[in-house]
Amino acid sequence: MRIGVIDGDGIGPEIVPVALSIATAAADTVGLTLEPVPLTMGRTAIDDHGDPLPEETLTALDGLDCWILGPHDSAGYPTEFRGHLTPGAVIRKRYGLYANLRPARAYPGVPATAPDIDVLVVRENSEGLYADRNMAVGSGEFMPTPDVALAVGLITRAASERIARVAFERARRRRKHVTVVHKANVLTLTTGLFRDACLDVARDYPDVVVDEQHVDAMAALLVRRPGDFDVIVTENLFGDILSDLTAELAGSLGLAASINASDGQAMAQAAHGAAPDIAGRDRANPVALIESTAMLLDWWSQREGDERGTAAAGLIRGAVAATLADGRATPDLGGTLGTVAFGTAVRGRIG
């Protein structure tokens, strides 16, 4: 399994090697060989190539099915590179990574606001109100006068049905329950179209229970009774917000795994940022990227029909959970282990 490895900025050069070493150990245990392909992005790429995302990196990604992407700190780039698409956005658009999958579950040993939460937010990742995803040319935000700003939102039936199928397929591997989240009482045409497309797809999955919620009610219900929900499918902006909420309910954004995927390629990318304030101090929490890499192995396994990836992902998840349950964690979770020591502890439980 050839896998691109992009350290990125901030804490990326600390957490990416830890995630890769754990994934390699798990893969070795089940007889799967990982072949890492190191690539460059971010401030290092600017210094070496004059571009935060060099063409040679993109050319290499063209030949890969999956990769690990470290965080980027575009706010810290030289002035001439600010205001451009971030490296992650360029990659997402280039490869059509339309599905953003963000699980959130509480871990024994980690204090959580919602100890019974175990949900998967399936976020449509190519449309919505995001200014870089809704126009063929230019931005979806514009100002007719200096004091008036407008935004265009994009919802299509094709993209809505496509993400709905991802959600229902995932639900079949979980607890067979999908909640469609929208705001059709106010955004009747746009999120109403999204809701209707998802419910149309639901007819092809009679074994999966489906219900629907307005996004404001959904936020309240996730706080009140998170254990009632399994897979949540929603449009881009709502998914971005709800996935951060579920991560914090589960204990921390530092635990928030994520992959961005199309039908043929996938990228492991933790939901958190580059945290430049703690970069280089061996304090970063690598759990989110470790779990994202496990999701990547699982995605590859499903696509290839090769159960070794799923087996390796299970080993990783079990090792992370057991390590945290023992109270061994990084300082943000109340522990005393550094980034490297935590990775060593997790790796020691594999095999």
Image (cartoon, helix red, strand yellow):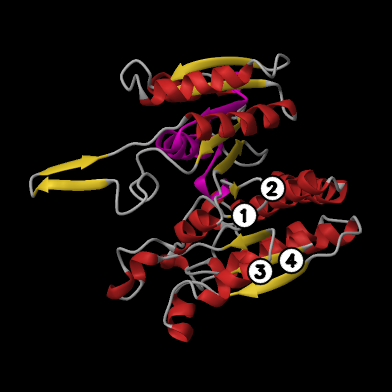
Quarter of the picture holding the N terminus: bottom right
Q: How far across and how far down the image is residue 24, in percent?
A: 79, 63
Query: Quadrant of residue 32 in the image?
Result: bottom right
Q: Earlier in the sequence, mark 4 or mark 2?
A: 4
Tag 4 residue: 21
Answer whether residue 228 is magenta in the image: yes
Task: Identify the amino acid type marked 2.
Answer: Met
Q: How far across and how far down the image is residue 346, in percent?
A: 74, 57
Q: Name the residue nearer the viewer: 1 or 13.
A: 1
CA separation in Å, label 1 and label 2: 7 Å
Q: Name the residue nearer the viewer: 135 or 125.
A: 135
Residue 17: mark = 3
Mark 1 crowdedness (10 Å alpha carbons): few <14, some 14-19, many ≥20: many
Answer whether residue 118 is magenta in the image: no
Question: At x 37% / y 36%, what residue is drawn?
Answer: 154
Residue 245 against residue 141 in the figure, above or below:
above
CA separation in Å, label 3 and label 4: 6 Å
Task: Identify the amino acid type marked 4.
Answer: Ser
Q: Mark 3 and 4 residues: CB-CB less than 8 Å, in contact?
A: yes
Q: Earlier in the sequence, mark 2 or mark 3?
A: 3
Task: Identify the amino acid type marked 1.
Answer: Ala
Tag 2 residue: 295
For the magenta stretch, what is the residue range?
A: 227-255
